Image (spheres, coloured by chain):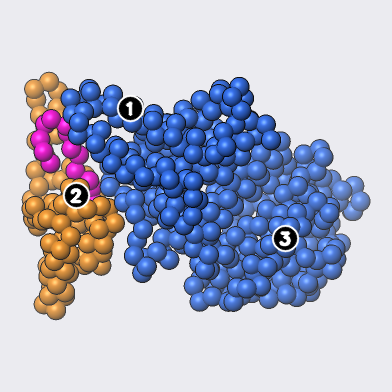
Amino acid sequence: MKRYVVMVAYAPGDWESASPEQRQEYFDAHHAFERYVDEHGVRLASGALCGADTATTVGPGHGDERVVTDGPFVELAEQIGGYYDVRLPDLDRAIAAARLLPATYTVEIRPVLVIEGYESA
Amino acid sequence: MSADEVLAQTVRQEWGRLVALLLGQFRRLDLVEDALGDAVEAAARRWPADGAPAAPAAWLLTAARRRVVDRLRAEAMAQRKEALLVVEATRPAAAGAVMADPGGLVEDDVLRLVLLCCHPSLAPEVAAALALRLVVGVGTADIARLFLVPEPTMAARITRGKRKIVAAGIPYGLPGADALPDRLRTVAQVAYLAFTAGYAPGSGADLLRADLAGAAVGLVRVTLGMRPGEPVLRALLALMLLQHSRRDARVGADGSLVLLPDQDRSLWRADEVAEGVALLSELPADPDPLVESYRLQAVVAALHATAPTAGATRWDLVCDAYAALERVNPSPAVRLAAAVAVAERDGPAAGLAALDGLDAALPTSHRVPAVRGELLARLGRDTEAVEALDVAVARCANEVERAHLEGRRAGLSAAGPR
């Protein structure tokens, strides 16, 4: 089993402007994803994120100083809107699960780095 | 055969199987390839003195396996987890018997290796480099030459690819029957990318690139050998063989480019032409656009390859194939090729008309003005022809091709009115 963080990105306002029927399709897609992960692996955590306009970024600074700014650390047309933290056997399963998410999303799959002797991921 | 020749042949024919077998046993991409390299090095020292072994592939496998186990032990000592890892390393030890019987058991291992290297999550140029290295056994320096990048760049690219395979958890397994055709399409695209990199016209060092294009043909052969019914692989192999069969005739004695009509047809590889034509004859039109695109390009290549002389080319059939290709896979490059064929069938004026609109689609290509210049020259409109060739020369980045264009332009300036 490998651990992956599956990040979903979509255009801001996608959810707010969706009709009730579209919202149901989104829910169904997320449930299909979750069912797939439950069948083939483990769901560790997940979350939907508030809009990027609510983000605060603590950036690198000089010496002990850190720079605190309003907004996300990178401005993009699409924003990270949520994540799943899952265990699945391999990348093909992770891709198969990601395919079940709403087709309008861009989905990024990142393996979680295991640091030997630091933690058991 | 001398011991050196036996070794070279074994590496050429068995590399992919050996990598696949070792990977199946140890699942350590980093160790497996190094160990096999070491084993080949040891063989190069020992075999000339001791004589080549009766089963050279089995010798290499055993030597490489010992080296992997040695390194796993060393790692285990370092991590004080010796018992655990050694058990893991020696568990499926039955693979020794597999080499003695080169039957179907190994074939799926090789297919796994091909699919691992050509996984869609790898960038195509990374996948192509990995497949040539791990499946066909092409050296890093030669792969770098094929893709025209410095050797350290290619070494880094291959290392990055291996790291991604391990870190991302790309599986070493066969996908289900529903997903396999899709994955084989990716293999075909990766192989064709490597092939076209080696097929670009040129001179000197580029002759070697033609050899390397042969390695890409080998990759398709290996894969097709395991899934003989796959239309995308059959169509691609036909296309590659028919194009590759002309390699010796495409470069003149002085290194200059020899165009198709001027090539010495006796230099074409008749066996490869025959094999390509035979493959093609069993391939019906395919609803899959990728397969059909390869098939139609192969049809064009076959029409050229089987014409007894350039003048006897069946341009009517070439035009038909290009027209079909434009429907399946419309692209400016296809339209340009189609315009050339139309000019041969219906005359230069018809060809010129077919070029209309292509300048906008291919604003930086030297080929559009080069073709226009040639067609204008055939119509006797030399002044316009020279203007078009001037544009072509200015845009052309390939020295050999540019020399050809300059020669054509000089001929016109001397003969025609300015």
Q: What's under tag 3, amino acid-wise?
A: Val
Residue tagged by mark 1? B71
Residue tagged by mark 2? A1
Q: CA distance from mark 1 to mark 3?
A: 47 Å
In the rendered image, residues at marks 1 and 3 fall on the same chain: yes
- Counting labels gives 3
The reply to whether discs 3 and 2 touch (Cβ–Cβ < 8 Å) is: no
Residue B95: percent from the left, percent from the top? 39, 45
Give the number of the mark in front: 1 or 3: 1
Q: Which residue occupies 90% across, 47% down? A: B414
Q: CA distance from mark 1 to mark 2?
A: 25 Å
Q: How packed is label 2: few (under 14 Cα within 10 Å), some, or many (20 or more)? A: few
Residue B193: percent from the left, percent from the top? 53, 52
Q: What's under tag 1, amino acid-wise?
A: Arg
Q: How packed is label 3: few (under 14 Cα within 10 Å), some, or many (20 or more)? A: many
Q: Which residues are magenta?
A: A107-121
Q: Which residue occupies 77% across, 65% down? A: B306
Q: Residue furthest bottom?
A: A21
Q: What's under tag 2, amino acid-wise?
A: Met
Tag 3 secondary structure: helix
Nearest the eye: B168 or A29? B168
| Chain A display color | orange
The secondary structure that most of the magenta stretch takes on is loop
Describe residue B2's horizontal placement relative to residue A73 as left or right.
right
Residue tagged by mark 3? B273
Q: Mark 1 or mark 3, which has the lower sequence index?
A: 1
Chain bearing tag 3 is: B
